[in-house]
Amino acid sequence: MLFSVSCFSQTSGFYDFKVKTLEGKEFDFASLKGKKVMVVNTASKCGNTPQYKDLEEVYEKYQPNLVIIGFPANNFGSQEPGTATEIRNFCTENYHVTFPMMEKISVKGKDMAPLYKWLTSKSKNGILDSEVKWNFQKYLIDETGKLVAVIDPKEKPTSDKVLSWISSK
């Protein structure tokens, strides 16, 4: 008699996620292996919105070794009310954003997106629990798909802390 044993991990890894871009195309996180990744929840009508400029500047300087992924979210003060087309136009016209922007999601509450459940739960990411405090909170993922830090929404992506992480080997 043959027995088959299957083991299923309770947690999925960062590279297991697939999401949709603002244009509705699938974006597979497996394509990010070997790169540092900054995941940011964004909003067009927030006091932190000018960080789009800093994010784009960092992205242009450090790609292809760093990928920044923006996730528009309307969870805080309804500061991202736009449609996918409106968000894309806003980001392009005002900040010349070229880093990948994904479809609008929820980053907290009962309808929290699976990626953000992973990012905020130690039981899933194996590193730490966190809460998304506001728009433009940054999650730093290393080249192996491990969560390494959570950066406060008010801290700019051009801060010494962020830039030293990006530059570290």
Image: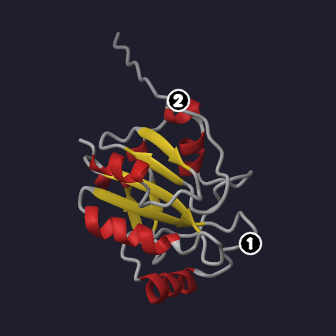
Q: Amino acid at mark 2?
A: Gln
Q: Secondary structure beneath disc 2?
A: loop
Residue for point 76% across, 69% down: 77
Q: Is residue 16 visible?
A: no
Q: Secondary structure at mark 1?
A: loop
Residue 133 drawn at (x, y percent)? 67, 52
| Residue at position x 45%, y 82% in the image | 95
Classify residue 154 as left or right of residue 139. right
The numbered disc on residue 10 is 2
Coloration mode: secondary structure
- Check the picture and name the quadrant holding the N terminus: top left
Mark carried by residue 43: none
- Sequence-wise, the earlier of marks 1 and 2 is 2
Q: Residue furthest front?
A: 160
The residue labelled by disc 1 is 78
In this view, the mark in front (1 or 2): 1
Q: Quadrant of residue 3?
A: top left
**Horizontal side of residue 34 vs 158, given as left or right:** left
Structural crowding at the residue carrying mark 1, measured as other residues with C-alpha within 10 Å and reported as few (<14), some (14–19) or many (≥20)? few
Horizontal and vertical percent position of residue 85: 53, 85
Residue 142's x, y, as percent? 35, 43
Q: Determine the image quadrant of residue 53.
A: bottom left
- Circles 1 and 2, Cβ within 8 Å, touching? The answer is no
* 121 lies above or below 153: above
* 43 sits to left or right of 148: right
- What amino acid is found at the position of numbered circle 1 in the picture? Ser
Answer above or below: position of 136 versus 110.
below
Instruction: Classify residue 86 as left or right of residue 81.
Output: left
Q: Spatial distance from mark 1 to mark 2, Cα to Cα?
A: 33 Å
The residue furthest top is: 1
